[in-house]
Structure formats: C-alpha cells, structure tokens
Image (cartoon, rainbow, N blue to C red):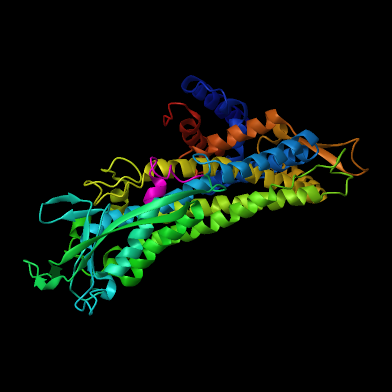
Amino acid sequence: MKIKKSLWLSLSLMLSLSRAEDDGFYMSVGYQIGEAVQQVKNTGALQNLADRYDNLSNLLNQYNYLNSLVNLASTPSAITGAIGNLSSSAINLTSATTTSPAYQAVALALNAAVGMWQVIAFGISCGPGPNLGPEHLENGGVRSFDNTPNYSYNTGSGTTTTTCNGASNVGPNGILSSSEYQVLNTAYQTIQTALNQSQGGGMPALNSSKNMVVNINQTFTKNPTTEYTYHDGNGNYYSGGSSIPIQLKISSVNDAENLLQQAATIINVLTTQNPHVNGGGGAWGFSGQTGTVMDIFGDSFNAINEMIKNAQTALAKTKQLNANENTQITQPDNFNPYTSKDKGFAQEMLNRANAQAEILSLAQQVADNFHSIQGPIQQDLEECTAGSAGVINDNTYGSGCAFVKETLNSLVQHTAYYGNQVNQEKALAQTILNFKEALNTLGNDSTAINSGISHLPNAKSLQNMTHATQNPNSPEGLLTYSLNADKYSQLQTITQELGKNPFRRIGVIDHQNNNGAMNGIGVQVGYKQFFGKKRNWG
C-alpha cells in the first residue's frame, strides 16, 4: 500500500507540475531529489541538499579552470600567445594614454590636486603678514599673481588675479604667506601649462617627456602704505605703493614624474601651512564648520595625498617594466610541460605578470582613494565652468575641472580588462612551473567530484562526470583529465534552480504520517514554486 501511495504521489506531482510548468527540468530528476529530502526529518533538509550541489559545483568550477590551464600549458601556441599578451599589456601601460590604467591614475591624481586648489582658493587669504621688514620683502612682500583661480568680493564675480596683501598673522590658522603662495602657484602653473592643449599639449605617455616653458606673471608692490582693516573687520591688509611687474619664464619638463612632484608641492604647502578658511565651510556644503584647511577639508587632502603617493609608486614601477621589455621572453623549442626541465621562461612570465598586476592594483588604489574625498568636494572637482583642463578664466574659481567621471570610467574599465588578462597569464605561468602539482590537484579533485556525485539523488545520470586517460606525450603514470560537458551543464542547471527556492533557508514541511504522503506534499509545495517560470505557489 505504501508503494502504491508513493507511486501515486510521484505521478500526481509530475502531472501537477507538467500542467503548471513548461521547462521540463524537474520531472526528469526533480522527484529523485524530492525523495532524498523526504527521507530527512528536519527543516534544514532542503538547505543541506542545495549546499551539497553548491559545494560540488564550486569544486567542478575549480577543476574546470585548472584543467583549462593544464591544457594551455601543453599547447606551445597558447604559451606564445600569453607571452605576446604580456608584452602588449606592458606596452599599453607605459606607452598608451587613454587605455593605460597607470596613465589614467596619474592623470586623476594630478587633476585632483589642481582641482582641489581651484575649488578652495577663493577662501584662502595671503600676504606678508604684520611685519614687512625694511625692504618690504618679509614673507615675500605684497604681491599679485595673474592667471589664478579667485573671486573678487568687490565686484561680486570671478577673477584671475590674486593679490597677496594680507597683514594678519601668517602660518597655521592664519593667512598663507606671499612666499608660500608663490611656491604653490609655481607648481599650479606648471601643471596647468602641461595640461593645456595649446601650451603644453597635455601630459605625454608615462614613458615620454617633453620640454615646456611656464610663464608666470606677477607684480611686486614697493613701499605699500600701512595696514588697513577690512570693512567687515576680518583681518588687516596693505594698500598703495608702487607696483613692479615681474615676468618669469621657467624652463620645465612635461612628464608624469615632474607633474606629480608639482602636485605634491601644492598639497604639501596647503597641509603644512594650514591657513584659515574665510567664512568657514558653508560655501562647500560644510555648514557650521570653521577653522583651517585641515579642519574643514582634512579628509579630502589626506585622500589626494594618498592618490599622489600611489600614482608615484605606479609610475616608478612602469619605468622598471619598460626596462624589462628590452629583453624578450623566449619559449624553448618543442617545450613539453610533462618532460621539459627548462622553465626559466615561465618564471620570467610570472615575474612580469606580477609586476603588471602590482601596477594595476596601484592604479585601482588611486581610484579608491578618490572615493575617500568628501562628497561635496567630489562634486566640485567634477564641475568645470572653465571649459577644459589647463584653462583659467573668471569662471575657474570653485570648480575643479578634474574630469573625474571620464578618467575614473577609463581607469576602472581598463584596469578590469588588463587585470583579467594579466591574471590569466600569471595563472598559466604558475601552472607551467608547478605542472606535476597541478596534475595531482586535478586527480584529487576528480576523485572528490565523483565521490560527491555518488551521494546525490540523481547520481546515476551524473556519474563519471570527470575521467582520466593516458597522454602519449607524458611520462608513464601521468594522466590527462577531461570533463563531460553535458553532465557538467546538467549539474549547473540543478544548482541554479535549487538556489532560487524560497524554502532553501527554512526547509520543507516536516511531517511524516500517512505513509509519507504529507512529507511528499510538503516537498511539492516548495518545489512547484521553485522550478516554475511563473514561480507560483501551489
């Protein structure tokens, strides 16, 4: 009687599902799985079953990936292709611009440093301080600088002139001295000249360099009159005197190394001098925050400083990478991983793959550092009212023109692409170097897979999913492993379907009476929803 009820339950379940479902998958093996769950009287039965399929699926994926590497290691043309890929990606890292993650990382660090200054410059006062000295040169004296990002409170509009005539205390929590402003401005103008397409032509590839001239226009004020107090009572300033124009033409180098050093100078001046921010942080979305540059923007400056350091490290490693490319990797003739002992080329492949992976990791770290910049500042860095990089006009103040979205998208996209490629070549090199160990792992995995299958409800249809044969090219005892693609696909489908079942984490109805009918109905309720395309409960 129990057999009849069980058979009736099986048939009725299949008929019910065939009316409600149209994928045809559950009926062939589903009830066998159901029988397995039915035998276990706890609410974790279905979860346990799904986990077993998950674990086996993960082991099969590992086996399949390693087996593909073993096959590639046994294919000379595949090794030649991998060596070529490593060379191409190295050339891209050092010689390309838009597709090089390392180049984009440097560009992002430069633009962040320059952009940060453009965003906050109008809130920073500068000047010689309260004591001009007998020659009026103390702390740089009273100076005006052209081609700078600023805002005129007198006209209520942007301006490209900054006058350093403050008479308040210089240094931390004071104003920026004229001499320190000059250091910062020289670094700023150097980067802007390089990035301006009509002047420096943009930063060249990381392995390139070109000369440029940086023009800096400023005036020095001789014999300024005594201090005045601003109308709002916020500090003192100098006025009057006679202006002496100064035109500087500085010979410089447009390359990544020099430009990153200039970016570091900008950040260093602002963080070490740590001047007071006029009006607090309200203009940048930090209402209620007052104090110095680091009090208000400290997190952003720390993030940009890390961006520059990581970009400098990446640049240094690209130079070493470029030097290594002068020596080609040569695969031995008639190389056979089963028998050949000369695997020095594979070690060199691994070394170069590791070097490239490290550069890509540093490039990604620059992007991650950027995301540590305070949210409102990130938005200001993206804004560009001046039009393009390196251009300074009355609209420059308050906007970074860092072109963050474009640079970040390019960096992330190409880091992922070349990262996957480099990791593949790295894995291949490791497989060649440790070939016998890879074969042993395949053998152990194959045994574990077939053992795991033997304990599944549908073991009969999946048995012998992996098998081994003797390879005529290998020494006696070394086997070649293969995977039955159809059976592998079948198990993957089961695993995916089990993962969609809502009962996976809560189990099935746990009741065992009427010769097992209730338990069978419980399984039907769960499985009917679980395998259907409409996912209806019933």
Residue with the most extreme right position: 476
As rendered, which of 452 and 338 lies closer to the eye?
338
Residue 441 seen by the camera: no
The span shown in magenta is 192-204
Q: Is residue 197 left or right of residue 43?
A: left
Instruction: Determine which quarter of the picture holds residue 303.
Output: bottom left
Please provide percent x and percent y for residue 389: 35, 44
The residue located at (55%, 36%) in the rendering is 496
Please provide percent x and percent y for residue 410: 46, 41
Q: Check residue 201 for magenta coloring.
A: yes
Instruction: Determine which quarter of the picture holds residue 251.
Output: bottom left
Residue 422 seen by the camera: yes
The residue located at (55%, 53%) in the rendering is 361
Q: Is residue 434 left or right of residue 415?
A: right
Q: Check residue 515 for magenta coloring.
A: no
As rendered, which of 300 and 162 lies closer to the eye?
162
The residue located at (11%, 51%) in the rendering is 156
Q: Is residue 504 left or right of residue 426?
A: left
Which image quarter is the N terminus in? top right
Please provide percent x and percent y for residue 353: 66, 49
